[in-house]
Amino acid sequence: MDMVIASLAAINISGLFGLGWFALVMLVYDGVMFVELSICATLFTVLALFTGGGIALAHRHKKRTAIALLIAGAVPTLMAYGFWIYLETHPIDWR
């Protein structure tokens, strides 16, 4: 169970890094776009709360609840990374 919790926490933390990088690149190339950056900040906060809550629950020996909370953050992260990989291998033709 500890391995599953560590793996899910690692996925969530990589999602936090990816989301932060996405927001930073958007800020550098597109400038301040309030709506888009506030969406990224909200998603970052929610994912950080899921990760922190899951780790806190794991330390309190509530491992099943911790796994459920970490999965709630890991599934959208994996789906987003999968979609980015798909877009990388199948570029959109904007013509």
Image (tube, rainbow, N blue to C red):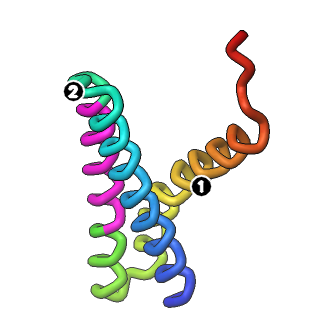
**Left or right, 49 with reference to 9:** left
| Residue at 31 percent of width and 49 percent of height | 44
Camera-side mark, 2 or 1: 2
Q: What residue type is labelled 2?
A: Val
Q: What stretch is highlighted in magenta?
A: 37-51
**Mark 1 secondary-structure assignment:** helix
Q: On residue 61, which mark appears?
A: none
For mark 2, does the 10 Å Cα neighbourhood hold few (<14), some (14 to 19), or many (20 or more) residues?
few
**Left or right, 51 with reference to 89:** left
Real-space Cα separation, disc 2 to disc 1, in angstroms? 27 Å
The residue that mark 2 highlights is 32
Residue closest to the far right: 90
| Residue at 29 percent of width and 68 percent of height | 53
For mark 1, does the 10 Å Cα neighbourhood hold few (<14), some (14 to 19), or many (20 or more) residues?
some
Q: Residue 90 location, x and y as percent? A: 78, 36
Q: Which amino acid does label 1 sit on?
A: Leu
Q: Residue 40 location, x and y as percent? A: 32, 39
Q: Is residue 1 above or below residue 20?
A: below
Residue 39 highlighted magenta (yes or no): yes
Q: On residue 78, which mark appears?
A: 1
